[in-house]
Amino acid sequence: MPNLQEIRKDLESGLPVLIYDFDGREEEVDMVFYGGAVTWKSVKTLRTMAGGLICYATGYQEANALHLPFQVDILRSLGDLSKLVKRPRYNDEPAFSIWVNHVSTGTGISDEDRATTVRYLHKVISETKKDENEARELFYKDFYAPGHVPILISRGIERRRGHTELSIALAESLGLERSVMFAEMLDERRSMKKEDALKFARNQGFHLLEGKVILQGVIM
């Protein structure tokens, strides 16, 4: 059974947790950082030790407050581009919304630039709990698109069981803002296998949680 206090302490101190989804789904492990503790070193860690696409994710309620759509809904409204909307092999519609940069960044792609974008996204998401109108105004004033940080929106763990939903459920269960940054862990040619990710987690001193544990309510 995972130690909830240790996991929260790690996340708040800027350490990642690893999340494996499910056998028969993507069968991938993501490295997850808490949005409120992201630094340029977090981005570098994802880039060099995970290797997959570095994303920011939040909850549906927060995204709705900012009037953020799902990317598939945007594409469905664009004529021929709607033909590109297809279900992936694991049959869940993607969680992607739009890609943004913070207005203070340079090109937006450096470790520091992406960390800046994520830190300000976290600030906006936190603001949605206080004043949705102010949060929305802040978002549209301080960000531009397209950028280098994709925003993913949780569809809710009861509707979709991807890494977006699992990581957001984890943050919520720990009493943290629903705000995370993550990337898939890659190996040569393919995604890192669960067994190799377990060895990596032990060597690095990181927690690895499986989706089935989250669903069983051990950490919810």
Image: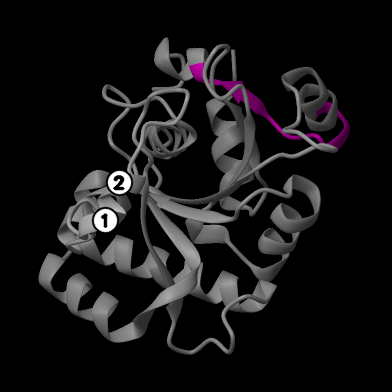
- Which color mode does the image show? one colour
Quick one: 175 or 46, which is closer to the camera? 46
Residue in the image at 39% along x and 24% along y: 91
Quarter of image, res 164? top left
Task: Give yes or no for residue 210 being in the magenta stretch.
Answer: yes
198 horizontally vs 162: left or right: right
- How many other residues sit within 10 Å of disc 1, few (<14), some (14-19) or many (≥20)? few
- How many numbered discs sit on the rendered protein? 2
151 horizontally vs 34: left or right: left
Q: Is residue 70 visible?
A: no
Q: Residue 128 at what x, y percent from top left?
A: 21, 62
Residue in the image at 43% along x and 87% along y: 103
Badges 2 and 1: C-beta atoms under 8 Å apart?
yes
Q: Secondary structure at mark 1?
A: helix
21 horizontally vs 154: left or right: right
Residue in the image at 64% along x and 31% along y: 29
Pointer 2 residue:
83
Task: Give yes or no for residue 205 being in the magenta stretch.
Answer: yes
Give, as a single range, the part of the protein colored magenta. 202-211
Q: Residue 67 at what x, y percent from top left?
A: 17, 62
Residue 120 marker: none
Give the quarter of the figure containing the N terminus: top right
Quick one: 112 or 82, which is closer to the camera? 82
Give the quarter of the figure containing the C terminus: top left
Pointer 1 residue:
80
Quick one: 125 or 26, which is closer to the camera? 26
Q: Residue 147 at what x, y percent from top left?
A: 47, 74
Q: Is residue 116 visible?
A: yes
Q: Residue 186 at what x, y percent from top left?
A: 75, 39
